[in-house]
Image (cartoon, coloured by chain):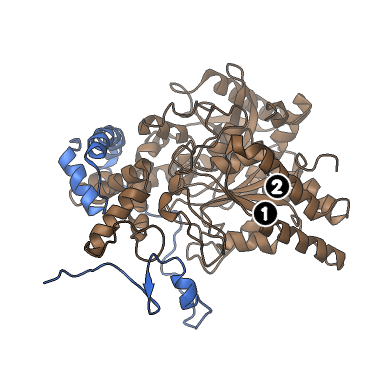
């Protein structure tokens, strides 16, 4: 192992298993990297040095005893600060949870621990995962390692930036409208939203329960697949968890053969608002799919054009209900409890002080959409759009194995540019939202740099629910072909920090 | 579809238990009016005979066996409480004085 922080998770796990390097050495190298660059990047809200080194030591001891190690044992990971971690702060990027120490682990957290994955710390995010730039964090924005003056995407900007800055080879995100895939595209990394219900939501602080889905973030498709297998699978603690086997994603990632696959290009994801360089790289990717032996056809999904409006009614509606739990009574911030104020006043003062602007806007919007008189026109219509979108997907998947589109209409925009223009911010998720509404599986992987700004462009692949393996089959083949063409990975073109 | 007024936003904020400042109210009313203008496009489908989808999975009433399982201790459950007393969450007064 020549470079501990630039190796893939698969390489690192193999080196640890063979005794070439210890898990403690690998972990220390990443902690040193975080120490060296995170003042600039701000990817982490909390670094758990002791816990990480302790977990690494446990892996080394297990190996010394001759026990078999799992496929990711000893590999460091950055965990989005929306998953509970027993004894370790969990803020969701919000002041209302500052200092909160959860008394239990999320299922994702405990599965990672069981797999011997070393959790380095918790990553920065838009408050309660509401945003597309990580600027809505109460703890300051995260910089994009490609250009620190630009956004790293969101809401999981911290997780994506940690990968791109070589602070961790693996990360976990959550994707409600694109919060794994859009940061992946923006930072030149790989992000997967698994099928809804395939990764447990137990201990994932809820934003929009019918849309939220945890998933893997990595620098390579194979690493994402290894992490996918580690966290997915039925969990009795989550009543919306699917009780079915996890698709063979690791095998699919290694296959690198897409001959005979049928791939649909979504016609609606192009045109006004799409950056020229993004479309150029996307069109080249479509050409590459053809060269690799896939049959490519154009597909029309007209209801996708209503996905963004439907999402910004459904997600805020569910959020307005989910976030009612922050009432200043059982955990988190309490403001104004001076002995004279009522519980109701204390709750209102606390929420005013503890929530940021975007969270307040969405709570009010959701309350509006659910109020009598508007319910049918807004929330009811949005639910009909959701049905129409699922029908468009069903019709498309009757003819093709996967769909492709750009992941985002543009590359990373400057920090501050859309910060107080919610509608402009919402456009960043135009292509990613339909998969959340339908509950299917989708991936973003890097497909080049936009010529006009030299920033990463993401290719989105969408597969039917529970056919997550198709994402990895296509993604693995595209990644291998592009790396061959470039002679290196895209991230190697990122400037040194 | 009508837009949203400052008074409506103030009412919704009260319902949502958000003690908004006056400037915040002005700003949000303006922004929410723009957002609602954009999302109102969903009502294009209002008249269509399409069943609503509330959830991507066709699940109803997922049950578990009614057996005692390990749970948090009272100390753990109260560990994040802003105020606790006699193994209970201490809250500000809920009923009026009179």
Position of the C terminus of chain A by quadrant: top right
Residue B88 visible in image:
yes
| Residue picked out by circle 1 | A49
Please tell me whether residue A10 is drawn above or below residue A327 in the rendered image.
above
Question: Residue A292 falls in which quadrant of the image?
Answer: top right
Which chain hosts label 1?
A: A
Give me the residue at 26% from left, 38% from top.
B24
Q: Residues within 10 Å of mark 2 (few under 14, many from 20)?
A: many
Q: Residue furthest front?
A: A338
Compared across the picture, whether B47 is left or right of A447 comes to left
- Give the CA separation, mark 1 to mark 2: 7 Å
Q: CB under 8 Å between callouts 1 and 2?
A: yes
| Residue picked out by circle 2 | A31
Checking the image for residue A416, the label placed there is none
Which chain hosts label 2?
A: A
Instruction: State the residue in front, A224 or A491.
Output: A491
Residue A375 visible in image:
no
Chain identifier, brown in the render? A
What x and y, as percent, mark residue A176? 47, 47
Compared across the picture, whether B59 is left or right of A8 comes to left
Chain identifier, blue in the render? B
Compared across the picture, whether B30 is left or right of A26 comes to left
The earlier-in-sequence mark between 1 and 2 is 2
Question: Residue A485 falls in which quadrant of the image?
Answer: top right
Q: Residues within 10 Å of mark 1 (few under 14, many from 20)?
A: some
**Label 1 and label 2 in one chain:** yes
Instruction: State the residue in front, A108 or A159.
Output: A159
Give me the residue at 23% from left, 39% from top.
B25
Instruction: State the residue in front, A425 or B73.
Output: B73
What x and y, as percent, mark residue A46? 58, 50
Please tell me whether residue B53 is drawn above or below residue A448 in the rendered image.
below
């Amino acid at each position: 192992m020549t470079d501990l922080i630039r190796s893939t998770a698969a390489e690192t796990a193999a080196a640890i298993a063979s005794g070439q390097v210890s898990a403690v050495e690998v972990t220390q190298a990443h902690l040193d990297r975080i120490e060296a660059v995170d003042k600039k990047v701000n990817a982490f809200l909390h670094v758990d040095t002791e816990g990480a080194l302790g977990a690494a030591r446990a892996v080394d001891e297990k190996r010394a005893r001759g026990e078999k190690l799992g496929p990711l044992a000893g590999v460091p990971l950055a965990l989005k600060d929306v998953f509970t971690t027993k004894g370790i702060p969990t803020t969701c990027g919000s002041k209302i949870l500052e200092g909160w120490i959860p008394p239990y682990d999320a299922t994702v957290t405990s599965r990672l621990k069981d797999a011997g994955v070393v959790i380095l710390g918790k990553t920065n995010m838009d408050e309660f995962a509401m945003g597309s730039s990580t600027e809505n964090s109460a703890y300051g924005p995260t910089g994009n390692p490609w250009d620190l003056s630009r956004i790293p995407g969101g809401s999981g900007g911290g997780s994506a930036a940690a990968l791109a800055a070589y602070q961790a080879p693996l990360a976990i995100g959550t994707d409600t409208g694109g919060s794994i895939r859009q940061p992946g595209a923006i930072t030149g990394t790989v992000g997967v939203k698994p099928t809804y219900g395939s990764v447990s939501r137990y201990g994932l602080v809820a934003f929009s329960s019918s849309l939220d889905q945890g998933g893997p973030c990595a620098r390579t498709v194979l690493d994402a697949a290894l992490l996918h297998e580690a966290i997915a699978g039925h969990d009795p603690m989550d009543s919306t968890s699917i009780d079915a086997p996890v698709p063979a994603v690791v095998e699919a990632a290694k296959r690198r053969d897409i001959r005979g696959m049928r791939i649909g290009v979504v016609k609606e994801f192009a045109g006004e608002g799409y950056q020229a360089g993004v479309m150029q790289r996307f069109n080249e990717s479509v050409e590459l799919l053809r060269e690799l032996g896939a049959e490519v056809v154009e597909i029309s999904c007209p209801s996708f054009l209503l996905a963004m409006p439907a999402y910004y009614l459904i997600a805020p509606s569910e959020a307005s209900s989910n976030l009612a739990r922050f009432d200043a009574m059982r955990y988190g911030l309490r403001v104004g409890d001076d002995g004279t104020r009522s519980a109701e006043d204390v709750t209102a003062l606390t929420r005013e002080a503890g929530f940021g602007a975007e969270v307040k806007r969405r709570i009010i919007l959701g309350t509006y959409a659910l109020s009598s008189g508007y319910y049918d026109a807004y929330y009811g219509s949005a639910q009909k759009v959701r049905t129409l979108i699922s029908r468009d997907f069903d019709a498309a998947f009757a003819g093709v194995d996967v769909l492709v589109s750009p992941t985002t209409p543009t590359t990373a925009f400057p920090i501050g540019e859309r910060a107080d223009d919610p509608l402009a911010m919402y456009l960043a998720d135009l292509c990613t939202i339909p998969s959340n509404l339908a509950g299917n599986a989708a991936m973003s992987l890097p497909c080049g740099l936009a010529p006009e700004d030299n920033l990463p462009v993401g290719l989105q692949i969408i597969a039917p629910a529970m056919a997550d393996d198709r994402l990895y089959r296509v993604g693995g083949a595209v990644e291998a072909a592009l790396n061959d063409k470039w002679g290196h990975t895209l991230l190697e073109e990122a400037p040194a920090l | 579809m009508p837009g949203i007024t400052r008074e409506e936003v103030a009412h919704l904020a009260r319902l949502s238990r958000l003690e908004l400042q006056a400037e915040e109210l002005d700003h949000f009313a303006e922004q929410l009016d723009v957002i609602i203008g954009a999302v109102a496009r969903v009502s294009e489908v209002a008249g269509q005979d399409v069943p609503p989808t509330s959830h991507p999975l066709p699940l109803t009433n997922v049950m578990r066996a009614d057996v005692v399982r390990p749970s948090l201790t009272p100390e753990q459950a109260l560990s994040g409480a802003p105020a606790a007393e006699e193994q209970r969450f201490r809250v500000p007064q809920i009923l009026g004085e009179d």
